[in-house]
Image: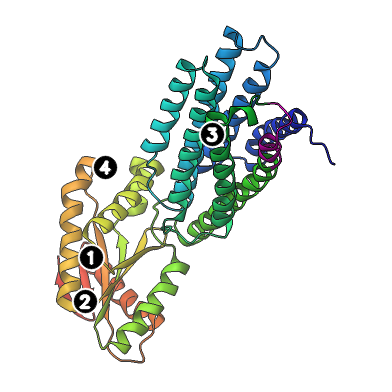
Amino acid sequence: MLKIDVPSLFIVMTLNLAIMAVALPYFMGRVNRAARCAQAGIVLQTAGWICLLSSSAFERGGWTDHLLSTLAMGCVSSGMVFNAIAFQLWCGQKPSVRVPAAIAALMTAGYGIGYADYPFRVAWANGLLALQIATVVLTLCRRPQLPVGRWRWLLVICLSIQMLVLACRAVLGGFFTAEFPNFFGPYLVNQVFALSSNAMMVLSVVAILLAHRDEAARELERLATLDGLTGALNRRAWLQQSAIDLARSVRNRQPVGLLMVDLDHFKQINDTHGHAAGDHALQLFVTGLRAVSRAGDVFCRYGGEEFCVLLNGADLASVMAFDERLRGWLAQHSPRELGFALSYSAGIDMRMHDGDTIDIMLKRADAALYKAKAQGRGCALASSMRLSA
């Protein structure tokens, strides 16, 4: 019959965890909060296993064994809390770990207080760790707010197996102590736990790497659609979305308006106040666009100091009202934020025919914008009609 060396399996698993705790931050590079939490979770679990293995080198039941074992429980359960935060963030959920964190604190405190009672501490620690994992599994089973890959179900499977094994250890340690009298002994429950822990640890790290890859892909996609300075859509993304919205307006027989904007005397702003002030002006303008836009309005930084807004379901009066709101917002905020008034010239175009394309509307709006600038700036024009000053 094959003999399984339980202590060796635990040592191998701890070494693997330690290697991953060092390697992941190096290979992941600069990461966001979710990946940092996952890395912290692995570091804490590594520290927990190191403490647990180290405790066996001291007198059983002594104060050093007591301290290291309690620290081990605290580190392992705290690592699960950080992992829970990472998984929630990767699923697009707002982190809420009060229950796992409360279980971690309760388990560590109870383990330390009741350490002298072996059946109690085994049942307490394994049972609460199983409960803590169950809360994380339930969170993973919730509908994610972002499109995620199959890593979520891989984690559910790995954590569920660990939860079941821990629950069995809790029952055996608490009520059938003769079947599980020593954590490092060659008992069936220890062998199953050691084997499953090694396998599930590897698969869990694979799932974490897959989750990080998904997040990186989403971030690359987001960066490919946004202007780096202002956070508005870039021209390419706006043109794609506007073409879709324009086609929808034709099908639904709804009006759509286009506003092309050019900030007035922007070169003078850079020359007089510096390029940092110019950048701040661009960012403030986008903040104003967000503040006055309706649901469904799509805007972008078209290039330099030019911006475009597509107003879905808007007639000419609605576009004029948008222009008035934006000018009012800038008049209120720009002197305080920038130290000078920020104004713009604009050209307005409306979809006139079913055959109109975004390119056609942009050309008409650009011609109107040119006339607005020629007439003294600080106004919006549509066709040959002056709309606002």
Name the residue: 63% across, 22% down: 52
Other residues around mark 4 within 10 Å, as few (<14) / some (14–19) / many (≥20): some
Q: Is residue 96 left or right of residue 172?
A: left
- For the residues labelled 2 and 1, the Cα–Cα distance comes to 10 Å
Which label's residue is closer to the chain start, 3 or 4? 3
Disc 2 marks which residue? 314
Which quadrant of the structure image shows residue 214? bottom right
Numbered disc 2: secondary structure: loop
Kindly identify which numbered label has been placed on residue 170: 3
Disc 1 marks which residue? 294
- For the residues labelled 3 and 4, the Cα–Cα distance comes to 64 Å
* Mark count: 4
Numbered disc 3: secondary structure: helix
Name the residue: 48% across, 48% down: 137
Which label's residue is closer to the chain start, 1 or 4? 1
**Residue 209 is one of the magenta-drawn residues:** no
Main SS class of the magenta portion in the image: helix
- For the residues labelled 2 and 4, the Cα–Cα distance comes to 31 Å
Which label's residue is closer to the chain start, 3 or 2? 3
Q: Is residue 288 left or right of residue 114?
A: left
Front residue of 90/136: it is 136
* Mark 2 vs 1: CB contact within 8 A: yes
Quadrant containing the N terminus is top right
In percent of width and height, residue 355 lies at 36, 92
Q: Give the magenta-colored segment's residue range.
A: 184-195
